[in-house]
Every structure is written in C-alpha cells, then in structure tokens.
Amino acid sequence: MTEQEIRKIADDKIIDYAKTVNPIEWHKMAMDWNYDSSKTFLKWLITNQQTEKATILMIYWMSSPKHGFEYQNEIEQKYTSGFYSNQNLSFNPKDDDGLDWTQEYPDLDSSKIPPVMYDKIDGEKVLSSEEYIEGIPENIFNEIENLYEEYEID
C-alpha cells in the first residue's frame, strides 16, 4: 500500500468513529488534536452543521489564524453567516484555562479577523479526555500506529 492509501485508511477510521459519537466528543477530540497532523477530521468538523460553535471557535484559534491556515476563510464565512447553530458548549478565546489565544500571535493583523471570532461562547465547560491520544481514541490511534509501522511510514 502507498503512504496516501494508509493515510486515507487512518482518516476513514477517525471519521467513522466520529460519526458514532456526539458533538461533545468531537469537541474533546479537537481539543487534543495534533494540529500538525492530518486535517481531514478538522475539515469534517468544519463542514458539519452539527458541530458546536465552541468547537469551531476553538479550532479557529488553535489553528493559528495569523498564518492564514487552510480553512480560515471557510470557518470565518460559515461562523459569521450562522452555519453553526449548536451552542451548548463554552469556549473563550481570551481565556482558555488561562491561555489567551488572541495574544498568542503577536503579529496577527486583527483588522482581518471578524470581531465575532473574539467573542466568548457560554455553555457547558468540556474537559480534556484521557481517552484520546492526539485527539484520536487510543485503540484507533494504536491501530493507525501499527499500520504506519507495518508499511514503514513516518
């Protein structure tokens, strides 16, 4: 198998799992996601109308908007147009357990970010889960690691 085929199998396993759990679990997964790895799960969340507004806002800030990440414009457009209507969870980009994401990027041109992206979302506070490794359920993470080792993929 090629590296691309293995990565697709891995992405499919993660999405298949996500389809079996609720938006709170999606939030936990995104919270612990390795933002340097595959973006397929994040893209799935961004294009999913059932994703919580808090999850989208968290993805937005954790993905470093100063770098013009791949989905920045899509998130801004969907977020500001009301695409995401689920608002049960909380996220505050200015106080994420003491971290101010809006200050993490000193050279951020804030005039290019819609003001609403700075607003706190009230709702249920979700805590990180030890069930996930880099946002992936441990059993699936191990399956993927075994596949990568079997086919000698980094």
Image (spheres, helix red, strand yellow):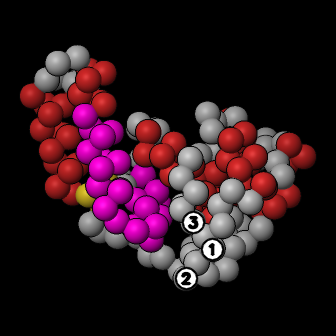
Question: Disc 3 vs disc 2: which is toward the camera?
Answer: 3
Q: Mark 1: few, some, or many residues within 10 Å (few <14, many ≥20)?
A: some
x then y, percent, for residue 39: 46, 39
Question: Disc 1 vs disc 2: which is toward the camera?
Answer: 1
Instruction: Name which residue type carries label 3.
Output: Glu
Residue range of the region highlighted in magenta in the rendering: 9-33
Q: Which residue is mark 3?
A: 52
Q: Mark 3: few, some, or many residues within 10 Å (few <14, many ≥20)?
A: many
Is 27 or 50 nearer to us in this picture?
Answer: 50
Please give the name of the residue rendered at 18% of the width and 40% of the height, measured from the top-left corner. Answer: 145
Please give the name of the residue rendered at 70% of the width and 35% of the height, measured from the top-left corner. Answer: 68
Q: Which residue is mark 2?
A: 124
Which callout, 1 or 3, points at the residue further toward the start of the chain?
A: 3
Q: Is residue 136 magenta?
A: no
Quadrant position of the N terminus in the picture: top left
x then y, percent, for residue 143: 15, 44
- From what the image shows, is residue 23 above or below residue 32? below
